Amino acid sequence: MKLIKTEISLFLVAGIVIGLDQWTKSLVRTLVVGEIWMPDGSAWLTPYARIIHWYNTGAAFGSFQGFGWVFTILAFVVVGLIIYYYPQVDDRDWWLRLAMGLQMGGALGNVIDRLTNNGQVTDFISVGKFAVFNLADASISVGVVILLAGTLFKDLSDRKLAADKLASVDLLPAEVNSGVEETTPTPEETTLIPEETTPTPGESVGE
């Protein structure tokens, strides 16, 4: 029961990503391949950003064309690893769980395309001269950024905590020494040892 509750958030995030990804792609497929669509009054944005119906048979952002089947297999492997490791993530590492959910949703979003669209992935977001991509690609990329940033932040926090602990340990000998110095008697407080007197030649030992 605890395992099911833990993974609900994973499938919730992934499900939202998949739903938005497939919905936007279904809208774009009503356009002719290569056709550009822009909202009314935003034609001036076309040189910088546009919606265009495009597709690819490779990986994210149009890379490795023709190797879609390889990335389909890799996607299932990645999804399996995410599902396996997700319950082992500490509850405090919410950023890691969010990243895993985004990556899982993005991977499955493109897999659904490949399995239902003759191995082709629908892309439609075009910014400048950058490769055309979709919401699934964006979700994977955002997940990677969150993962890297969260890992870096946690590493810095752990190092700071370790340094603070080391500093507190280093202070202990100084505190002990200061306590000893406070209890050490001053020269005025030391006990004077009486000097042994030597009898003069005229004095007898018995006197």
Image: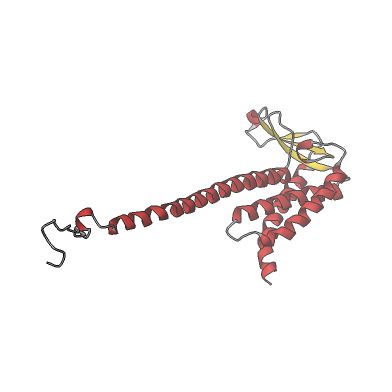
In the drawing, does residue 68 fall left or right of residue 45? right
Tell me if residue 124 can be seen.
yes
Residue 203, image x, y percentages: 11, 60
Q: Give the quarter of the figure containing the C terminus.
A: bottom left
Residue at x 69%, y 68% (from the top left corner) = 3
Residue 156, image x, y percentages: 54, 46
In the drawing, does residue 164 fall left or right of residue 54? left
Q: Camera-side residue: 16 or 176?
A: 176
In the drawing, does residue 198 fall left or right of residue 164? left
Image height check: is 203 above or below 111?
A: below
Could you say which quadrant of the image residue 46 lies in? top right
Image height check: is 32 above or below 71?
A: above
Image height check: is 137 above or below 78?
A: above
Residue at x 64%, y 30% (from the top left corner) = 45
Tell me if residue 53 can be seen.
no
In the drawing, does residue 203 fall left or right of residue 134? left
Q: Give the quarter of the figure containing the N terminus.
A: bottom right
Q: How many marks?
A: 0
In the picture as drawn, the residue positioned furthest to the bottom comes out as: 1
Residue 60, image x, y percentages: 76, 40
Residue at x 75%, y 37% (from the top left corner) = 61
Q: Camera-side residue: 116 or 44?
A: 116
Residue 40, image x, y percentages: 65, 35
Residue at x 81%, y 53% (from the top left corner) = 76
Could you say which quadrant of the image residue 142 lies in? top right
Q: Tell me the colour scheme of the image.
A: secondary structure
